[in-house]
């Protein structure tokens, strides 16, 4: 089940009705899958973790509940410790350390995927093909733009992954381009 995208996608859709949250899951999934491929890792396993990293958020949005409730649901469904720990580690407030390459990749892709989406949506064409690294970095300096996205987490994610920020941003833009139709971008 952990490598069965259809199963994981159905679980995501059971808990998540918001189109924007679904698109966020798809964008993070695209970025994490691309890194899994780059690192010669299990793309299905990594991708499904990314797909489900926020699946509980719509029902349990508080810091006390998310992603703890999701981890509990996944445990009851028989998901492995590795799968669940990666999801717990994507949020600093859980105090679960990011140790594996998978955990670092999920964290690194989460905030930047949302930020790239926001940058794309303010472009007149709303097309990700037109988004450049310099546009993303310029918007990162604008504290009023997409203020819910942590710039510190974007920077820290690239650092923990050991990838220069510009390279990481470009990599995620390219990954998201591959699913732009699904993202509406």
Image (cartoon, rainbow, N blue to C red):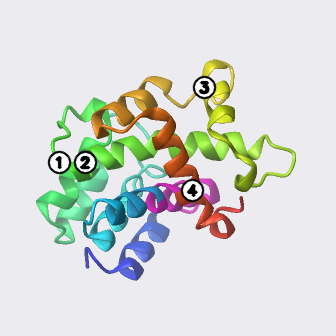
Which element carries disc 1, helix, strand or loop?
Answer: loop
Horizontally, residue 180 falls left or right of residue 9, namely: right
Q: Which numbered disc flags the more N-terminal residue, 1 or 4?
A: 1
Q: Are marks 2 and 1 in contact (CB under 8 Å)?
A: yes
Q: Which numbered disc flags the more N-terminal residue, 3 or 1?
A: 1
| Secondary structure mainly formed by the magenta segment | helix
Cα gap from disc 2 to disc 3, whole angstroms: 24 Å
Q: Residue furthest left?
A: 81
Q: Which quadrant of the structure image shows residue 140?
A: top right
Which element carries disc 2, helix, strand or loop?
Answer: helix
Tag on residue 103?
A: 2
Cα gap from disc 3 to disc 4, whole angstroms: 19 Å
User: Magenta segment range?
Assistant: 16-30
Residue drawn at (18%, 66%) of the image: 76
- Percent across and percent down for residue 161 are 30, 40
Horizontally, residue 121 falls left or right of residue 65, namely: right
Label 4 crowd bin: few (<14), some (14–19), many (20+), radius 10 Å: some
Residue drawn at (34%, 49%) of the image: 106
Horizontally, residue 61 falls left or right of residue 69, namely: right
Q: Which quadrant of the structure image shows residue 108?
A: top left
Judging depth in this view, the residue of 12 and 118 nearest the camera is: 118
Tag on residue 174?
A: 4
């Amino acid at each position: 089940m952990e490598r069965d995208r259809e199963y994981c996608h159905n679980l995501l859709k059971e808990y998540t009705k918001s189109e924007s949250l679904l698109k966020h899951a798809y964008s993070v999934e695209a970025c994490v899958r691309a890194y899994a491929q780059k690192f010669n890792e299990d793309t299905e396993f990594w991708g499904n973790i990314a797909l489900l990293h926020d699946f509980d958020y719509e029902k349990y949005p508080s810091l006390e509940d998310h992603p703890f409730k999701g981890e509990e649901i996944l445990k009851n469904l028989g998901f492995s410790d590795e799968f669940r720990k990666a999801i717990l580690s994507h949020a600093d407030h859980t105090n679960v350390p990011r140790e594996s390459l998978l955990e670092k990749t999920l964290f690194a892709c989460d905030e930047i995927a949302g930020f790239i989406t926001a940058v794309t949506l303010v472009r007149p064409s709303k097309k990700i093909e037109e988004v450049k690294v310099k546009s993303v970095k310029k918007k990162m300096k604008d504290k009023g733009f997409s203020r819910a996205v942590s710039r510190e987490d974007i920077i820290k994610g690239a650092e923990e992954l050991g990838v220069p920020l510009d390279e990481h941003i470009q990599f995620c833009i390219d990954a998201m381009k591959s699913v732009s139709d699904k993202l509406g971008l």
